Amino acid sequence: MAARMLSQGGVVAYPTEAVFGLGCDPLDADAVARILDLKGREASMGFILLAGHRDQLDPWIDGLTPALEERLYETWPGPVTWIVPAPRGVPWWLTGGRDTLAVRVTAHQPAAALALEAGMPIVSTSANRSGKSPARTALQVRRRFGGLLDAIAPGPVGGLARPTEIRDLLTGRVLRAA
């Protein structure tokens, strides 16, 4: 049901490696605007795209050398989000107006299954209001967002204590430690 909601322009919550995330079709500007409103977040922050398989991200990554591809793929699937060069035409609401995009191929089965069933990478941001702690259970999601979501995908969060590490692909620098 959650995957169907994504393809119909819905906003869903789903378990990730450490917390519940909020997601939608990355090309649906209205759905992305709903997430921004739910979180009280600025569009300039951009979003992560979460995929169930690296092929889902091929259209979203531009101009990688073989060495950069190797760096990227040696951590996927897994809990590492990479900042990569974005191809032309990626919506500004995903990049925050930058020429880069945050992407991850998850190894967390419930999240990967959702992206694969939806047939697209999905927006991934923690299920919380900006500045508040992220939800770690479906019950916490329901309490915080009630009927404002179109679906909550079932399943537990993974074993990470903190959201995934974020690295810059071009420099290898860690931007957020896990």
Image (cartoon, grey):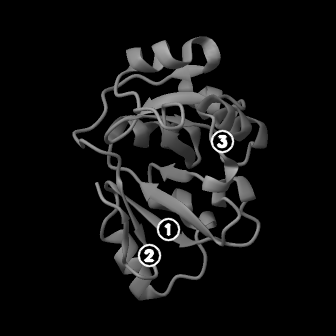
Q: Is residue 78 above or below residue 39?
A: below
Other residues around mark 2 within 10 Å, as few (<14) / some (14–19) / many (≥20): many
Where does the N terminus fall, quadrant-wise?
A: top right
| Horizontal relation, residue 100 to residue 80: left or right | right
Query: Quick check: marks 3 and 1 in contact, CB under 8 Å?
Result: no
Task: Please report the residue visible at 41 percent of the width from the left and 33 percent of the height from the top.
Answer: 134
Where does the C terminus fall, quadrant-wise?
A: bottom left
Rendering coords of residue 72 (x, y %): 39, 72
> How many numbered tags mark residues here?
3
Rendering coords of residue 173 (x, y %): 37, 75
The residue that disc 3 covers is 25
Other residues around mark 3 within 10 Å, as few (<14) / some (14–19) / many (≥20): many
| Horizontal relation, residue 145 to residue 178: left or right | right
On residue 54, the disc is none
Question: Which residue is farthest front?
Answer: 131
On residue 169, the disc is 2
Amino acid carrying label 3: it is Asp
Task: Please report the residue visible at 74 percent of the width from the left and 72 percent of the height from the top.
Answer: 88
Q: Find the distance from the CA under tag 1 to the CA under tag 2.
A: 6 Å
Rendering coords of residue 159 (x, y %): 22, 39
Q: Secondary structure at mark 3?
A: loop
Rendering coords of residue 56 (x, y %): 54, 56
Q: Nearer the viewer, mark 2 or mark 3?
A: 2
Q: Secondary structure at mark 2?
A: loop
Q: Secondary structure at mark 1?
A: strand
Amino acid carrying label 1: it is Ile
Task: Please report the residue visible at 49 percent of the width from the left and 50 percent of the height from the top.
Answer: 50
